[in-house]
Amino acid sequence: MASIFASTTTPSITRAGLLPKRALGVSSSTVLGLPAMGKMGRVRCSMEEGKACSHESKSKMGMGMGASLMAAAMAASMSSPAMALVDERLSTEGTGLPFGLSNNLLGWILFAVFGLIWALYFVYTSDLEEDEESGLTQTSKKEEEGEGESVTKKMAVATSLTVTTPKKLSSLSSLSSPTLHSLFFSKALSFSPSSSSFLSLRKTLLLSPSHHTRTRRRSFTLSASANPHNYDFDLFTIGAGSGGVRASRFAANYGASVAICELPFSTISSDVTGGVGGTCVLRGCVPKKLLVYSSKYSHEFEESNGFGWKYESEPKHDWSTLIANKNAELQRLTGIYKNILKNSNVQLIEGRGKIVDPHTVDVDGKLYTARHILVSVGGRPFIPDIPGSEHAIDSDAALDLPSKPEKIAIVGGGYIALEFAGIFNGLKSDVHVFIRQKKVLRGFDEEIRDFVGEQMALRGIEFHTEESPQAVVKSADGSLSLKTNKGTVEGFSHIMFATGRKPNTKNIGLESVGVKIDKKGAIEVNEYSQSSVPSIWAVGDVTDRINLTPVALMEGVALAKTLFLNEPTKPEYSYVPSAVFSQPPIGQVGLTEEQAVEQYGDVDIFTSNFRPLKATLSGLPDRTFMKLIVCAKTNKVLGLHMCGEDSPEITQGFAVAIKAGLTKADFDATVGIHPTAAEEFVTMRTPTRKIRKTNPSEGRSESEVKAVAGT
Amino acid sequence: MARKMLIDGEPAAALEEEATDFDFDLFVIGAGSGGVRASRFSANFGAKVGICELPYHPISSETIGGVGGTCVIRGCVPKKILVYGASFGGDLEDARNYGWELSEKIDFNWKKLLQKKTDEINRLNGIYKRLLSNAGVKLFEGEGKVVGPHEVEVTQLDGTKLSYSAKHILIATGGRAHLPDIPGKELGITSDEALSLEELPKRVVILGGGYIAVEFASIWQGMGSTVNLVFRKELPLRGFDDEMRAVVARNLEGRGINLHPRTNLTQLIKTEDGIKAVTDHGEELMADVVLFATGRVPNTKRLNLEAVGVELDSNGAIKVYNSYVKVNEYSRTNIPSIWAVGDVTDRMNLTPVALMEGTCFAKTVFGAQESKPDYSNIPYAVFSIPPLSVVGLSEEQAIEQANGDVLVFTSTFNPMKNTISGRQEKTVMKLVVDAETDKVLGASMCGPDAPEIMQGIAVALKCGATKAQFDSTVGIHPSSAEEFVTMRSVTRTVAAAKPRTIGGVQNQLQ
């Protein structure tokens, strides 16, 4: 690497020298632009020549081409109308400076510095192909932690760069190569394409069908639009939640120029508030789990009594400490997410994105064009329109209440309802859960539904089954009552509705461009996440497939691969594990017993309902329930369910095994880890029951078919 | 062997006919995990089974034991109970930032915990006895001795001796802790006593770097004692993945345990202020309790095995301390009618392994199914706080054994709970992958819930899961375990069977 650097220093410096002029002078001069491009072309070409011998065919399709041929190709691309378009946009982007800098001059300096870095980078691109990618992947590795640290380091470098004035910039060219080298190394890896209009230029260059794998990567097979149009961005993402951030980062890593827009941060979502990180980080998984951690302590205090711990006075909980610490953590995380985007060279635009046409997004009045638009705006809680519903809160509000509810009604029997019931119960609120059905958690395995309901009731939650809410009434003293089909329960400080979530598809221009939306308001997409408009794609909750963060991540990665890696990838929805962070929590993967019987007929059910070691000492009535559903014909494990302490953590590893198609025999062959709860899953020797639907003769022939299909 | 098995396996006629020749089809000496499992399963296969066990007491000796064995009475179970008890110490600290206002004075009552632990063990001891009687296994209380290839003698509590003949004899007498030979060793205790101390010691010195030492260090530290952990190597937990050993050491230190690596104890001296433990560096550590966690020896001494010609081995150690019963892969000794399972054979001294050996024995001898225990990819855990759990190969083993290069994926992160509690303790996870086959050769984790998390991973590894299969599994969010399926980039690639390049990051993404 170092030696190559030395041999190419001169051309890159020339390029660097041009930058300030360009940056400070004429913003949209084609005249200036052309020579610059010409030089670049030459640098590029000489690189190609120099590298031809050292690289193998596949990654360098241009290696066979001579420098002259390359130059010709460049010239051709530059004289095309596309060039003019690019330069026009230069001026547009002058106003919409990268990273939303208000100071114009500073913006240009930044701009120029990036240009320099980019120029250096450009020289190296072909050689860096591998290194860059791994470098990026590494920096993007640990989203919640390591990322934060590397981000901080990176920003320090950026700061030191921005203080350089344009004058100094030109003098930079005379710096010794080691400095440049290190500059290059610390920055070029992270600031690769996009985020400045130079990159549009570069994109144009690279799009010329000539020399680089990058070019081929940029191609996409699924998109219908193959026109040679030039856009501000290869990808414009609306919504910076789990799916949007993931898709954007990966797209940028694959070489696309990407912008993403997101609403300003608020703990409560609305048409005008959101925040980078999305539901998961700001109003879902993360804050929820933090509150679960906090609320679980009351149970742990009780348990600890059985283990010899005694408190002089009962532990008391201070709601405001928890909420303040939680919000500090959310601020940290949203900052990390912003940095992740920045580090991946995804341009973040704060504002409300609206689709204007299949290739144009309006963000608060400013227009951006993009080859592809990704809609990843997620969903938000929905409260049914009953009298007095304005007095009710949803999960957004419940995560950020100013004070702890004294007595709360939670309407709904889904996972959100149960999680909040556990949280408030643990924090010593009086909790009433109103569910329309006989049991909680519709769609879950019936035995799990029974079990978790019992366990939660034992911990003090009052369930009101088969009660539908009809009205919320606020009385003179400010307390709330809930009127249901069975009567009225009074004296609530809070009434929370956990009655479902709806995709955020309203007023973002979807209908006007012809994006099909289903009855529930979700964007209809094909298996590649493409909507009815070929250039518009959607991932995550807005598509209402499986509404889980890791699924949105999977969809985001698949989309980035499909669009920018030339690898059409479908997200795989089989055996997606999931958890409910109720207390006790649930982990599950695969089919429920009911689904398994329906799909396979003959299944063996293994269950274990036991008192964990901890409970024998604590004296609390906690139990753990585990269940394996096995196909009687193939011996494959079709489903695994657990309710009890650590269920979510325990389920993950088994999900790998089940996803890999392992059999009950494989489970049995695994030695247990003693003493754990999880070992129970590998020591279930006798079926609790065998369910047989098919007659033996049929069964045999079917099993043969399935066995073949399974392998 | 195979033919023999067939005969054993033809239950009805063959067994009945031969049963007339012996008092029992199987007589088991030792009712611990392996012995109980083997007898129950053999009985289920139709064999007539007798088992003998020493009288019950928490502290074992040549003449004291108890149905349930080490695991239930002096090992896994009481240990884990104490670990639970000790974990609350850290949890209470963590609770404050989550908004909990705890009184300054929090009492930990060791005696109460000890009593509850003993109650639980008594209960389990009873359960085990019931398990045996329900399976139709005849239990004798007393010391068993092998008198001949088909003869056992049980010395009962009152001194009377019973003699029985058996077609097969199974030795499952386990092992027990042993003290190093240093001056003043009688002042020290073993893990047996440590699980049943009258008082919670304020100052503890632990000698040893194995899992028992590390677990007790965590237990006492969590309960508020001052702990000095003295071990001979650079890092504790020899045999585990080096990187993970360093993580454990860091965590122990982070929780407040004083580590003394490359140190040994040379003598213990009784003083008015307690026990003075002198190290080979001349340092003097004062303690109320000195625990020797310096290894365990098989219980073979009083079985009269040599007299009947059963071969013992010592694994290179001094024979007098460490004479384990030598067996073949079916757990059979050189005397065809005498078999052995569990710690007394010193293969892999874990309860679930003894269970596996016991099950395989029963299947082989009475179930007409030749079964060898399979020792590959056995997961296990160290219940330190936080715990460590592993399955498969360590990085070092993988480098030695893998065909191709070894890809190492690691993830070090701050668990979500710590973001608010403020606890400075990273969770570390590691996957070791064969670059050629993409097979995951080993997984390790140190952090909360590691043992629970590792069990499922072990199923996957046992069946040769590839890294691609891990990657294709969707995560459970937010959990720690999801990290195992989201390790995208290689931390380092190590060439097979070559010295590892330290810090040499060779990225090889496909």
Image (cartoon, rainbow, N blue to C red):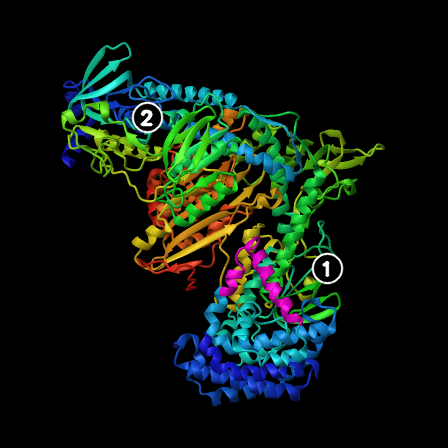
Query: Does the magenta stretch mainly form a helix, a strand or a loop?
Result: helix
Where residue B105 appears, as percent x and y from the top left, is: 63, 28
The residue labelled by disc 2 is B32
Where residue B109 appears, as percent x and y from the top left, is: 54, 23
Residue drawn 55% across and 36% down? B90
Name the subunit of mark 1. Answer: A
Dot in front, 2 or 1: 2
Q: Residue furthest right?
A: A476
The residue labelled by disc 1 is A507
Q: Nearer the viewer, residue A26 or A19?
A: A19
Where residue A570 appears, as percent x and y from the top left, is: 50, 59
Whether marks 2 and 1 lie on the same chain:
no
Where residue A465 appears, as percent x and y from the top left, is: 64, 31
Can residue B383 be seen in this snapshot? no
Q: Nearer the viewer, residue A32 or A388?
A: A32
Can residue A178 be seen in this snapshot? yes
Q: Is residue B323 left or right of residue B419?
A: left
Asked if residue B166 lies in the magenta stretch, the reply is no
Give the structural element (helix, strand or loop) at label 2. loop
The boundaries of the magenta stretch are A135-163
Q: Is residue B129 left or right of residue A149?
A: left
